[in-house]
Image (cartoon, helix red, strand yellow):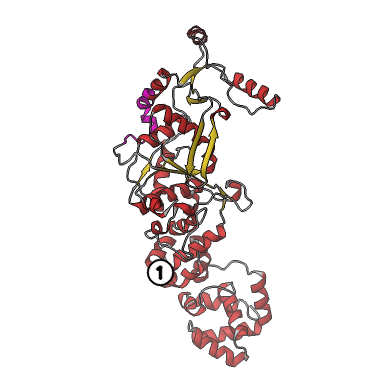
């Protein structure tokens, strides 16, 4: 794609089905679509594809919209705010679809199909046995009016199938994959209306993209082979074709599609764990899209760094260690007040400032709260070794020194150095291990000041002789 085309105002959309939580892969597609619209000064539309009545739930729709807002992916038209193409819930667009179904049927471009699930499975089995790819055999395409009436008299409810034109070449240029060419003979007649009267994905997804003015559709490359079907539909209805781009799917470290076995997969799960929106967006920006900036970007500056011609064909590997990197980068740029609100436990400003560089997720602060005012967990092997090497005499001297210095670490170590002759790591490491239960972490001096003196003294004394 040329720079000039990339800079033209585009209208993009995100069209999720409210059948579960917002998957990270779908969030990435929404994010890229949002960036493209914002960069070009166009519009970003949210459309809810809820024609699957059995699986679609209002709570999933509401959760999905909440997670998108949390990420900062605001929309210009949608089910909650309306717009010129309302309604934006496909369950409310049945009358519009019915008009188009009637148009296709009247033009001979669609026909009722009475084949049962058993009929279709048998047909596919016979095709596979004959070494042919399974596709609809066109059984009901040439039924007479009498034959259709006979089937309906038996109580068979028909689906509506699109009559795929023969000997047609379907061509389009994909934003990501380049020129594409398909032969209609390789595509069987497909269902556009289910036997319960609801619209199938192939149909409503395509016609809504057209009539809502979408200029660029971005979606996963698992939909690439759906595109020729949808283009034939639009052509048969005389509707405008949008542009299409199919990005590589999001996969785990093992190359398999990202799923529960890889850990968290939904935006809700990452939010619940304490990941920050800017961290997630910085990681997603670099998954299947080559950024021209290596460093951290604010959400406001990201659209300027989005390039449609930098979208990738290859599967993008999600790596939580990289997400943790962007989480740290985001935390470094937050104020103490923002970090305190993120931790969400009413910690003192001194505590927040002390631990902010040693936490990545809110749960990481829990052990440091215990260090300041609670009970330490059992020592690890490394901490045990440091304490044992120092010996009980060291901690007896440390207890006496603490009685003189109290919570002033500088004074404590000065007295202890004079009494034991220890210095450097040999002096500080045993103190840190005894006082905090860890040999790494925030600076010890301010940490010691936050501890109740009796707590610090008790911890030192617990490692001395005769206690």
Location of residue 197 with respect to 294 vertically, above or below: above
SS state under label 1: loop
- Nearer the observer, 54 or 161: 161
**Within-10-Å neighbours for mark 1: few <14, some 14–19, many 20+:** few
Q: Is residue 38 above or below residue 416?
A: above
Q: Quadrant of residue 88?
A: top left
Say which residue appears at 42% left-offset and 61% top-offset: 342
- 328 or 426, which lies in front? 328
Magenta includes 89? yes
Q: Is residue 233 left or right of residue 467?
A: left
How far across and down, in percent of the image, does residue 454 sit?
A: 50, 76
Residue 26 seen in the figure: yes
Q: Taking 49 as reference, is 377 left or right?
A: right
259 is higher (above) or lower (below) than 293: above
**Residue 335 on image: x %, y %:** 38, 68
Above-or-below relation of 430 to 204? below
Q: Residue furthest left?
A: 84
In the figure, residue 322 lies in which quadrant? bottom right
Residue 20 seen from this side: no
Outermost residue toward the bottom?
418
Residue 132 x/y as whole percent: 66, 27
Q: Camera-side residue: 167 or 366?
A: 167
- Quadrant of the rendered structure where residue 182 is? top right
- Which range is magenta? 85-99
| Quarter that holds the C terminus | bottom right
What is the chief secondary structure element of the magenta stretch?
Answer: helix
| Residue at 38% from the left image edge and 40% from the top image edge | 214
* Residue where numbered disc 1 is placed: 348
């Amino acid at each position: 794609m040329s720079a000039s085309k990339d800079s033209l105002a585009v209208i993009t959309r995100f069209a999720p089905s409210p059948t579960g939580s917002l998957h990270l892969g779908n969030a990435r597609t929404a994010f890229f679509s949002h960036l493209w619209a914002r960069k070009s000064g166009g519009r970003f539309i949210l459309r809810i594809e809820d024609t699957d009545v059995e699986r679609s739930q209002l709570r999933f729709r509401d959760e999905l919209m909440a997670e998108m807002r949390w990420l900062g992916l605001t929309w210009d038209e949608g089910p909650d705010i309306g717009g010129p193409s309302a309604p934006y819930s496909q369950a409310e667009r049945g009358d519009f679809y019915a008009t188009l179904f009637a148009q296709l049927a009247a033009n001979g471009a669609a026909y009722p199909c009475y084949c049962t699930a058993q009929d279709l499975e048998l047909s596919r089995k016979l095709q596979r046995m004959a070494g042919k790819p399974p596709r609809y055999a066109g059984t009901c395409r040439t039924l007479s009016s009498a034959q259709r009436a006979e089937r309906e008299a038996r109580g068979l409810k028909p689906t509506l199938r699109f009559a795929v034109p023969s000997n047609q070449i379907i061509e389009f240029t994909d934003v990501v994959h380049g020129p594409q060419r398909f032969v209609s003979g390789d595509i069987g007649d497909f269902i556009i209306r289910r036997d319960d009267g609801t619209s199938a994905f192939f149909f409503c997804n395509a016609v809504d993209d057209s009539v809502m003015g979408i200029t660029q559709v971005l979606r996963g490359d698992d939909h690439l082979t759906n595109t020729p079907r949808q283009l034939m539909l639009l052509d048969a209805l005389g509707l405008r074709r949008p542009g299409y781009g199919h990005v590589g799917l999001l996969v785990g470290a093992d190359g398999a599609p990202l799923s529960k076995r890889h850990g968290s997969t939904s935006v809700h799960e990452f939010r619940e764990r304490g990941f920050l929106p800017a961290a997630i967006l910085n990681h997603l920006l670099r998954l299947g899209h080559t950024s021209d900036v290596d460093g951290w970007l604010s959400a406001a500056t990201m659209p300027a760094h989005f390039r449609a011609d930098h979208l990738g064909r290859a599967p993008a590997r999600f790596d939580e260690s990289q997400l943790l990197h962007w989480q740290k980068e985001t935390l470094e740029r937050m104020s103490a007040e923002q970090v305190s609100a993120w931790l969400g436990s009413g910690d003192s400003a001194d505590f927040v400032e002390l631990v902010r560089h040693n936490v990545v997720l809110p749960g990481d602060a829990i052990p440091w709260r215990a260090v300041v005012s609670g009970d330490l967990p059992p020592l690890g092997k490394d901490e045990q070794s440091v304490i044992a090497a120092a010996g009980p005499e060291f901690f007896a001297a440390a207890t006496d020194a603490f009685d003189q210095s109290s919570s002033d670490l500088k004074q404590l170590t000065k007295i202890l150095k004079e009494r034991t002759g220890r210095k450097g790591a040999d002096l500080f490491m045993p103190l840190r291990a005894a006082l905090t239960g860890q040999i790494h972490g925030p600076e010890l001096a301010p940490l010691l000041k936050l501890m109740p003196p009796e707590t610090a003294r008790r911890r030192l004394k617990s490692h001395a002789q005769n206690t």
